[in-house]
Amino acid sequence: MVIHDRPYAAESVTPSWLLGENGTGPFKFLLSQHQAGLTTRGRSMQVVGSSARGTLARWSSVSSLLSQFGSDPLRSRYEGPYWQISSGTSLPKPLGEPEWKRPATSASAMAAKTIIIDHGSGFLKSGWSGWNYPQLIIPSIVNYIPCQENPGPSYAQRQVSLGIDPCNPDTFSHPIERGHVINWEGVEHIWTCVLQHHKEELEDCPVMLTDFPLKEPAARKKTLEIMFEVLEVPSLFLADQLEMSLYASGLLTGVVVDSGYGLTQVESFLLGCPLPNSKRTLEFGSEDLSTYLFKSIFKEKYDKHNLSQMDSVAMIQMRKCYVPNSLQEPLDFNQDLSCGSNEENTFYLPDGSPVELTPLELMAPEMFFHPQVFGLQGPSISQALVDSIESCEVLWQKMLMSHVVPCGGNSLYPGFTERLSQELNSGHSPYEATVWMNEKRHFSVWLGASVVAHLSSYRSQWMPRQEYLESMRL
């Protein structure tokens, strides 16, 4: 069943290399803004489950907020794979008139603009509040290259830059791993580049930054220090990622299942508030899926810093991988096929050599439902979701199960949401499950923050820079 409500924004045609055919490519999700060719469309959300009609009556008024954002955004485009973004490459510049048309902004409207930053383990999305897509998507990747003036191996003699240096591909790293910041210098460099990019249009804008998933006090303290003391932002809002995803779906009550690059998180919400002890964090995501494909396909030649291998794994994830209805059916089907008899299972490497993908390689996203098959520990997504709901009061469990909201890039794999609905309705819970699928769920966190930035009820959660400086003097 497809629910259509009022049109709320212009939507761009997303480059295929950015999202892939199914929007699932973790390595292609990189430095880009969406291209031209804007068309006005209605926002749609698909509901999976036979209790869909009953959920319509509980459709939250938050969805009406989404209908208010309809300005045509100024976007720019960067063409090419992310490993071509080396040191010295600037972030993309907006194209000039008349191909792009800036939305008319009054002085008061510009003053109300907020920079929204969603920084995950794999990617950072940023843009202006009120828009329906982030205008900038960059990899959460930095590389260190030797300083030409004083080359050497020591930490102080290296320069940090964005992305991957194709001349030194083994020097890149992710400053955030599994929700933990392991390299604050890299995080600061990424934030600096992003804010400089947005401040070219407007100076001294407040910043809404999504909080790191694990919400460690030391990480929050360091975040405030960088934002207020180094970057000197006028005010800051640290937003909860899963809460923002719920608002992006137009709901206030439900269970959010966010599966991203490094983590998969589940949490239940009632009227916009997280329910105690309902959060579940699974330490696997698309990073593990990529690692499995690397090792399975390239075996002893496996090298995660090899650009050709990285591109091949990304293309396989985008074009070949899917979630089956069950684990056993495709295994039985492929056993009946002779080697090479199914062209759809063949992938050609950059050198032209064919690779016959095994059933488990094609079904690599199955790890979210059977992690033990792929050597991962912990419960499946569906089991974590049921555990989250069962930790809540019995009074709310039926309503929570009827409002399951998947989001994150992994939820876009073909068959993911259907399989999630099937698993939840196969006896895991006494209640019937309904899965709500927002078409923009890979940007749910950013989009929800874009909505919240305009709500007066959240003003008390903003921290002005002056208040922070005064607290540091005490």
Image (tube, helix red, strand yellow):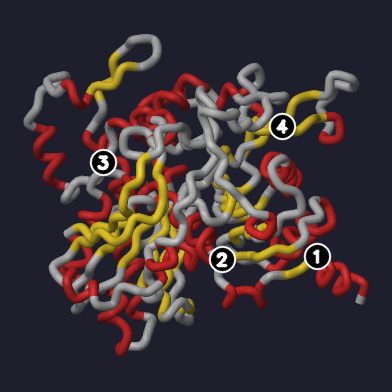
Of helix, strand and loop, which one carries label 1? helix
Pointer 1 residue? 465
Marks 1 and 2 sit apart, C-alpha to C-alpha, by 19 Å
Of helix, strand and loop, which one carries label 2? loop
Residue 141 vertical placement versus 86 (above, below): below
In depth, the one of 119 and 236 nearer the eye is: 236
Contact between marks 4 and 3 (CB within 8 A): the answer is no
* Neighbour tally class for label 3: few under 14, some 14-19, many 20 plus, Cα within 10 Å: many
Of helix, strand and loop, which one carries label 4? strand
Marks 4 and 3 sit apart, C-alpha to C-alpha, by 35 Å
Q: Position of residue 474 (x, y in %)?
A: 91, 77
Q: Mark 2: which amino acid? A: His
Q: Position of residue 136 (x, y in %)?
A: 56, 41
Mark toward the viewer: 3 or 2: 2
Q: Mark 4: which amino acid? A: Ser
Pointer 3 residue? 322
Pointer 4 residue? 161
In depth, the one of 175 and 29 nearer the eye is: 29
Q: Position of residue 1 (x, y in %)?
A: 17, 59
Mark toward the viewer: 4 or 1: 1
Pointer 2 residue? 454
Q: Residue furthest left?
A: 336
Q: Examine the image and state in which quarter residue 246 appears.
A: bottom left
Q: Mark 3: which amino acid? A: Tyr
The mark that comes first in sequence, 2 or 4, is 4
Residue 355 in view (yes/no): yes
Q: Residue at x 12, y 20 (%)?
A: 341
